Amino acid sequence: MKNRILGNTGANVSEIGFGAWAIGGGWGPQANDDSIAALNKALDLGVNFIDTAEVYGNGKSEQIIGEVLRSRNSQVYVATKTPPVPGKWPPSPYCKAEDRYPEAYLRKNIDERRKNLGVDCIDLLQLHTWSRAWNRNPTPLDVLKKLQAEGKIKHIGISTPEHDQNSLIELMRKGYLDAVQVIYNIFEQEPVAELLPAAIEHNVGVIIRVAFDEGSLTGKYALGQEFPADDFRSRYFQADRLDRTVSRVERIKEDLAKLMPADSYTLADVALRFVLAHPAVSTIIPGIRNIHQAEANTKVSDMPPLPDAVIHKLRDHYWHRGIWYGGK
Ligand SMILES: NC(=O)c1ccc[n+]([C@@H]2O[C@H](COP(=O)([O-])OP(=O)(O)OC[C@H]3O[C@@H](n4cnc5c(N)ncnc54)[C@H](OP(=O)(O)O)[C@@H]3O)[C@@H](O)[C@H]2O)c1
């Protein structure tokens, strides 16, 4: 496993991290034993960065991570997230920052995150979403600065709102953020225009989420496939979205077949190597929920870079499809 530096935090993090949403629930049935085994396997294979959140099972994902980390002596950097006070998601431009992330709420919520993870100080506290409307007076970030000074959080980040990822650029320029969490994959390549260059310019750590487009870029979904109602993908891939996506994935596979020997990479490998090819990227957090995925995803760090011709061809697959919020 190769490591990279997480921006100005200086943390030396594994190129492949652990996306811990599914181990908290929401992606169909998930046995705790599988989650614990997946985490241990990933850590054994060199993962030292985990991303979780309160909303992944109302703290369940954090609790499992806390339990596993206490059971072993690994140096692991854990990022978690505080959601806004319930209301519109993403926040509307009419929401006030002080209403969605008030100081008393942030303090209480972050204490809960510390308790679930079993730590005094959280490595990276990310606000789970944001609105551009708050950039002029980002009061929640001032609260996080105070909590940082009090030793309750080490570093500060935000996970981009899907519809307006560039809204974080101004905050990066003004020095508010140590890290940003960004959607970047073979379909969603817009961050290349401004967000990723700005991260390099301002030495902000970049955590890439949804590198597989919620699994589609592993190439394993089939036309007409249905997900159970308790699986978030039943909403994300609602109506014709799955079939349209699968057709796009087939075109990627056809292009790759012309450029690379079929047995040299899986599509999942290519999806991760494509993301790692951007120099702004500090770590990718593919969703991992079993030992097989821990092994398959961690091995990609030690694979050779994709040939330039492949990278260039994959750029053709940028798909500006608008925003598919789950539950829409
Ligand atoms: N707003 C936010 O801040 C936000 C939103 C989304 C995600 N995230 C974070 O980003 C992480 C990653 O995103 P994600 O989990 O939503 O999506 P993702 O990484 O694009 O896809 C995850 C899914 O891909 C499948 N998978 C993983 N490795 C595979 C492999 N090697 N071969 C075949 N299939 C594989 C699994 O599907 P199966 O379930 O079928 O096994 C897994 O559940 C999350 O876990 C979370 O930490 C944050």
Image (cartoon, grey):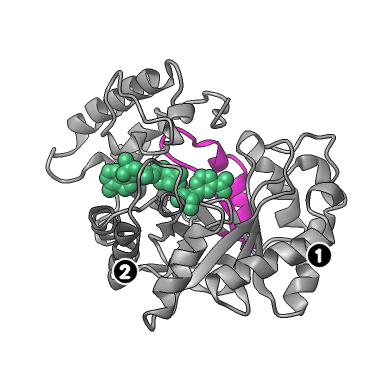
Q: Which mark is residue 109?
A: none
Residue at the spot x=27%, y=34% of the render? Answer: 219
Between the residue at mark 2 and the residue at mark 1, the CA separation in whole angstroms equals 34 Å
Residue type at mark 1 is Val
Q: Percent x, y for residue 55?
A: 57, 51
Residue type at the position of mark 2: Asn
Q: Is residue 90 a member of the stretch shown in magenta?
A: no
Identify which residue is drawn at 68% across, 37% down. 89
How would you rate the neighbour count of disc 2 (Cα within 10 Å): few for under 14, some for 14-19, many for 20 or more? many
Q: Which residue is mark 2?
A: 40
Residue designated by label 1 = 143
Q: Position of residue 88 (x, y in %)?
A: 72, 35
Query: Which quarter of the figure has residue 93?
Result: top right
In the rendered image of this protein, does residue 204 appear above or below residue 190?
Answer: below
Residue at (35% x, 23% y) in the render:
248
Precedes in sequence: disc 2 or disc 1: 2
Quarter holding the N terminus is: bottom left
Residue 200 magenta-highlighted: yes
Q: Is residue 139 left or right of residue 107?
A: right
Residue 169, image x, y percentages: 70, 48
Q: Which residues are magenta?
A: 181-205
**Residue 282 shows in this picture:** no
